[in-house]
Image (cartoon, rainbow, N blue to C red):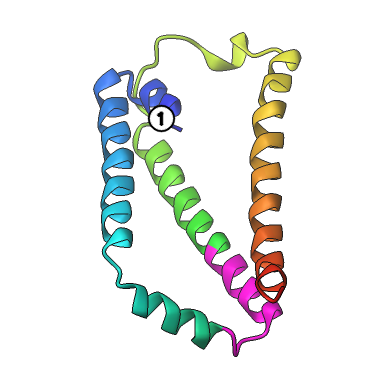
Amino acid sequence: LITYIVYRTNSIFTGMLAHFTNNAMAMVISFFANKVPESILVESEVASAGFPMWLQIIVLAVMVIGFSAVAVTLLVIFTKRTKSTKTSSALSSDLKAGDVLTFIPGVLIMGAMFVIVILGYIMLPAINNF
């Protein structure tokens, strides 16, 4: 995504700003996540035990779809606003059919990570009951 931003704006500084923003958000979230008292975590774990697993998965899926929709919307707005920007090379003439295959390992890794997280989310209550 950052590469696309650099390509569309034809400036490395926008990529640097996007990278900084991404890392800063991760650091802020990490900082505040570590400040949450353990008593709140235990209370939320007990409170979520009353909800069926299927409902928790639906809520998680809705959150993922919602955040994805926001990301796609922002990307479309960015693309429309940078349409008049001159890029240094023509992407359509340089792309070959075999180049698409280079994305397959990354997509497979991301898919595997998603499945592992979902399976961990489903199996964690069963593991905790032992």
Where does the C terminus fall, quadrant-wise?
bottom right
Residue positioned most to the bottom: 50
For residue 34, what is the image quadrant? bottom left
Q: Position of residue 2 (x, y in %)?
A: 40, 30
Left or right of residue 27: residue 89 = right
Residue 69 lies within the magenta run? no
Residue at 57% in and 61% down? 65
Q: Nearer the viewer, residue 50 or 89?
A: 50
Which residue is the site of mark 1?
2
Residue type, mark 1 in image: Ile
Q: Is residue 55 shown above or below 15?
A: below
Camera-side residue of 42 and 4: 42
Q: Main secondary structure of the magenta part?
A: helix
Residue projecting furthest to the front? 130
Residue under the point 68% across and 51% down = 116
Q: Please tell me whether residue 124 is drawn above or below residue 53 in the rendered image.
A: above
The stretch of residues the image draws in magenta is 49-63
Q: Is residue 73 left or right of residue 56?
A: left
Identify the residue shown where x is 36% and y is 23%. 6
Q: Let me know if residue 62 is in the magenta part.
A: yes
In-front residue for pair 126/120: 126
Q: At 33% across and 41% down in the image, what residue appears? A: 22
Kind of element beneath mark 1: helix
Residue 117 horizontal/vertical position (percent): 63, 54
